[in-house]
Image: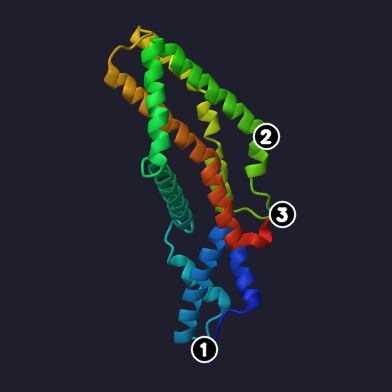
Amino acid sequence: MNRTITQEENEQLFQFCRRHYVYHYDVQIELVDHLASAIEEQWQQNPELSFDEVLKNSFKKFGIYGFSKIKKQKERELKRKYNRLLWKYLVKFYRWPKVITTFICTLGLFLLFQIVDQTFWIIATFAFLVLFGVIIYHRFFLKKIKLQIIPGKSFLLADQLEKVTSVYVLAIQLPNISVQLFNLSGTFAIKNSWILLAISFIMVALTVLLYGQLFYLPKKIKEHFLEQFAEFAL
């Protein structure tokens, strides 16, 4: 009969991960699975080896960087995953039927630029509206969006949620950036219709992206967390 990992040894593997600076439970699970498989493979060849011996041999396979390479790989995977989700969310607004709403908003902004003839003030107003929206978001929505996890546990998925929602810090800089750009350009009005159309397109796309980053992605991350780790949520 092949020797397998016991429940006590499995817990020792989690402790081993923590001793080697892996504190995120979702990363620990993956590493423990790798270690357990490697240990049981060694026991198939030599069941007389002690648990500590096979664990030491298995850890050597991770090289001089230990578990840090796996952790960084997991972080990159999560980042790519949610960047793709955000991109798909944006693309939906340029496909039927949502493209109608996007087109109307872009055309409305373009006509406003043509009628008002004050490019800077329209963009500045947009920037300050974004700033106001970010303040409201921080005041009323951020706490509701955050994951509530039982004490003593940390998750890479929860860290990803923190990174996603922290984009509001960059949005706060929009009013200052808009002023600086127009100071550099030395003009407060743009007459070229194609440039105005491009600005209108960018402003609408930026609004969709910001909404997706602050509301859509956090919702998806929370859904994925509850699917995998519902027992750790408060």
Question: Residue 65, relative to residue 184: is it above or below?
Answer: below
| Nearer-N-terminus badge (1/2) | 1
Relative horizontal placement of residue 129, taking residue 200 as reference (left or right): right
Query: Which residue is disc 1 drawn over?
Result: 2
Q: Amino acid at mark 3?
A: Leu
| Nearer-N-terminus badge (2/3) | 2
Q: Amino acid at mark 2?
A: Phe
| Nearer-N-terminus badge (3/1) | 1
* Mark whose residue sits in front, 2 or 3: 2
CB-based contact (under 8 Å), mark 1 and mark 2: no
CB-based contact (under 8 Å), mark 2 and mark 3: no
**Alpha-carbon distance for marks 2 and 3?**
20 Å
Q: Secondary structure at mark 2?
A: helix
CB-based contact (under 8 Å), mark 3 and mark 1: no
- Whether residue 52 is visible, yes or no, is yes
Q: Amino acid at mark 1?
A: Asn
Crowding at mark 3 (Cα within 10 Å: few <14, some 14-19, many 20+)? few
**Alpha-carbon distance for marks 3 and 1?**
40 Å
| Residue sitting at x 49%, y 83% | 43
Residue 199, position as x, y percentages in the image = 36, 23
Q: Nearer the viewer, residue 131 or 159?
A: 131
Residue 215, position as x, y percentages in the image = 55, 41
Q: Nearer the viewer, residue 190 or 100?
A: 100
Q: Which mark is residue 234?
A: 3
* Mark whose residue sits in front, 3 or 1: 3
Question: Residue 126, relative to residue 215: is it above or below?
Answer: above
- Image quadrant occupied by the C terminus: bottom right
Residue 187, position as x, y percentages in the image = 35, 7
Question: Residue 37, relative to residue 185: is it above or below?
Answer: below
Residue 224, position as x, y percentages in the image = 55, 56
Query: Which residue is disc 2 drawn over?
Result: 140
Crowding at mark 1 (Cα within 10 Å: few <14, some 14-19, many 20+)? few
